[in-house]
Amino acid sequence: MLPLALLALAYSLAGPRRYDGRGRRGLSRQALVLCAPRPLTPRQLNGRIANASTVDGILQLHAAHGDALDDINLSTCWSRLGRIAKNADRRLLLQDPALLAPLARQTAAALDDWGPWGVSATAHAAAKLRLEGGPYEALWSKLGTAAAASARDFNCQGLANTAWAFATAGRPEPALFDRLAAASEPRLSDFPSFALGQLLWAFAAAGAEAASLFDASAVELSAGRLKELSPQGVSMVAWAFATAGRPAPALFEAIADEAAPRLAEFAPQGLANLAWAFATSGARGSAQRRLFAALAAESPSRLATFKTRELANLAWACAKIGLAPRALFEALGEEVARRASAFSVPDMSMTAWAFASAGHAAPAMFDALAEAATPRARECSGQAIANLAWAYATARHASPSLYSALASMAASRARDLSPQAVSNIAWSFATASHPLAETHLLLDALGAAAQRRLGRFKPQELANLCWAFARVRLPSPSLLDALAEEAARRLDAFSGQGVATLAWSYATLQHAQPDLFDAIAAEAAPRLRRFSPQAISTIAWAFATAGRPAPALFEAIADEAAPRLAEFAPQGLANLAWAFATSGARGSAQRRLFAALAAESPSRLATFKTRELANLAWACAKIGLAPRALFEALGEEVARRASAFSVPDMSMTAWAFASAGHAAPAMFDALAEAATPRARECSGQAIANLAWAYATARHASPSLYSALASMAASRARDLSPQAVSNIAWSFATASHPLAETHLLLDALGAAAQRRLGRFKPQELA
């Protein structure tokens, strides 16, 4: 509004009124010129822009005076917008790009002539306003060019702000970041500590290669400057180095020493980021242990203030480095269970993985996560499916509904899953006690998808995939053939356990692959020194089970295993003995191995499972190396645990002692007492073995023989020729009542008469 006095003066000087052509009278041209406001100077405009309190106010000022704005005015517009815009303003500007389009166009056109402050301030503001996409592409492109050209002229804060802006906007422009790094590195000591942290964060977030900058910054910060940083700055520096993957052990040691006594000052995000950074960086040492001990003490009472992502990151970090205190994980489990429905699916999978990896049982938490994740399975990425499946399988926590949902999603996306995800999902479902029908359908889908790209699988992923099919006894000939061909080409890249897993899988599935087994034999023999005891015994078992002769391999196994038997678990000892006995391997190396087994085993028999006792006894008897001391110890242990044996293992053990000619009356009595009431569980082979063993050992057991006679007579038609022959011989040899023996032989004879052509000569005799 014109002041009243000025308005009056204008009218007095106007002279005769003029018409506007529409019958209305107005002021003369002279009066209009006098009434027009005077243009504002750039300094006055800048003051108005700087004092504007709303986004609308700035946009109105630009609309009214746009042509008169210089570079300082335009950059002040951006700086003020970045400072005062609220979330609602940002959303509105993103929804309606036309609101900022005139300012963005004018700025982009003028940027070539701007100074460094204007470029930096504008980029910083545009990033804070979250301006992205087509409408702002020209602005960002010109900002990048101008910033690269001005990099050496920026002050330290300008360098940090510019890097932060482009990283935040998701514009990792290599040429620009190279210029910023080159301009920053010689001036690191001039940077305010927080600005240096901001600079490092930006380079890490943008994924910019700047090894020299990070190394120089690590030296600068380690030299006492961490004390100048706020807790947020400390965690930001740690995050940056971990994300950039730049090793800095001295810096992380210094960060741990600086942060541990100050953790009470850290916000929850800072605590979580600090833990994540140390776990990701691979930093190790006493300072790290002190830091995580302090985190474990500080965090539990504050977990209610953590965001769900922060809870997930903290759990993941502790599990990743193997420092997962019970008190902390109990508190985490309770908090996660309480808020499970608020977690994102990736954070659910990360948390479940952490608890399973740490070996911390948290049934209520696993139930809550499963309940929350099941209806949201469609949100799962391939990695989330794999992590959830692996976690529940590893934790042995049954969740049929979740597993069904994961199976459905994994099968439908099998072609898009990474090799690692395929391998882990297959392993998880094979490990979990999930219905076989659904597991088989999933594995068929995974196998079909994997077969087309086996060359992209790492050796361990190939081994795990193969193991999964073997674990659930699912034959897949075309996949197994392709996998064998791929594995044979790359056996030298497999670990010892991977080689053993391959051999075990093909032997278990009875899928003949002689070329693969020959390649394994050639590859494994010279590398056995680097194989674990479990891998060695598994390979021996697999070759024996597959019936693939490999004399040189067995010789090498005997030489390698004999001096290392103290490292073998009971199952490994038993499997090794069984494999050598089954394979028919002979020679001095084998004799040395069994002599070592006879010396190593007696003092450890109490730790053997019943099947392992039976296998060890059987193997020694089978090859004719049955030392008295070993069999005396075996007899005592079997007698003590006879009732815990399965019927097949009873028959195998009795056969072994009889075949070795080792009298063990107490053991035979104990086995007879345990086997008699369970005679109905006997297979034809078990009946024959028990009968033969007691007859050969001349150990009378009327009750057992009566039970065996009854079972043999009732099943005579189903018995193999060998079983018929051995049972007949045993009862004829034993001092069993003739009446019962005659009835049994009549039944056996009648059954045999119909199929004498299938009997071998010795069986007929």
Image (spheres, rainbow, N blue to C red):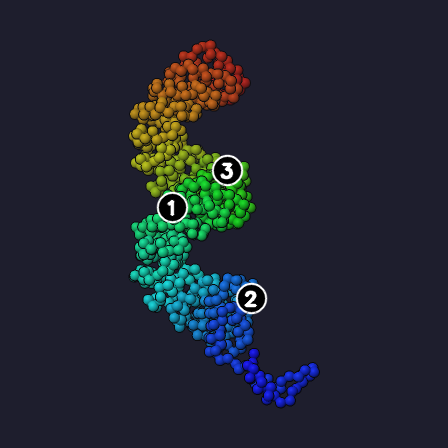
Q: CA distance from mark 1 to mark 2?
A: 48 Å
Three-letter code for the amino acid on which mark 2 is drawn? Pro
On screen, 755 above or below 305? above
Viewer-proximal residue among 303 and 458:
303
On screen, 398 above or below 65? above
Q: Which residue is mark 1?
A: 328
On screen, 624 above or below 30? above
Name the side, left or right, on which 61 lies relative to 644: right
The reply to whether callout 1 and callout 3 are in contact (CB within 8 Å) is no
Mark sitting earlier along the chain (1/3)? 1
Going 37% across and 60% down the picture, which residue do you hit? 233
Going 37% across and 28% down the picture, which residue do you hit? 613
Q: Secondary structure at mark 3?
A: loop
The reply to whether callout 2 and callout 3 are in contact (CB within 8 Å) is no
Q: Is residue 538 visible?
A: yes
Q: Which residue is mark 2?
A: 97
Q: Position of residue 521 (x, y in %)?
A: 40, 39
Q: Is residue 186 visible?
A: no
Viewer-proximal residue among 97 and 722:
97
Q: Position of residue 632 (x, y in %)?
A: 31, 23
The mark lying in front, picked from 1 and 2, is 1
Q: Which residue is mark 3?
A: 434
On screen, 278 above or below 740? below
Mark sitting earlier along the chain (2/3)? 2
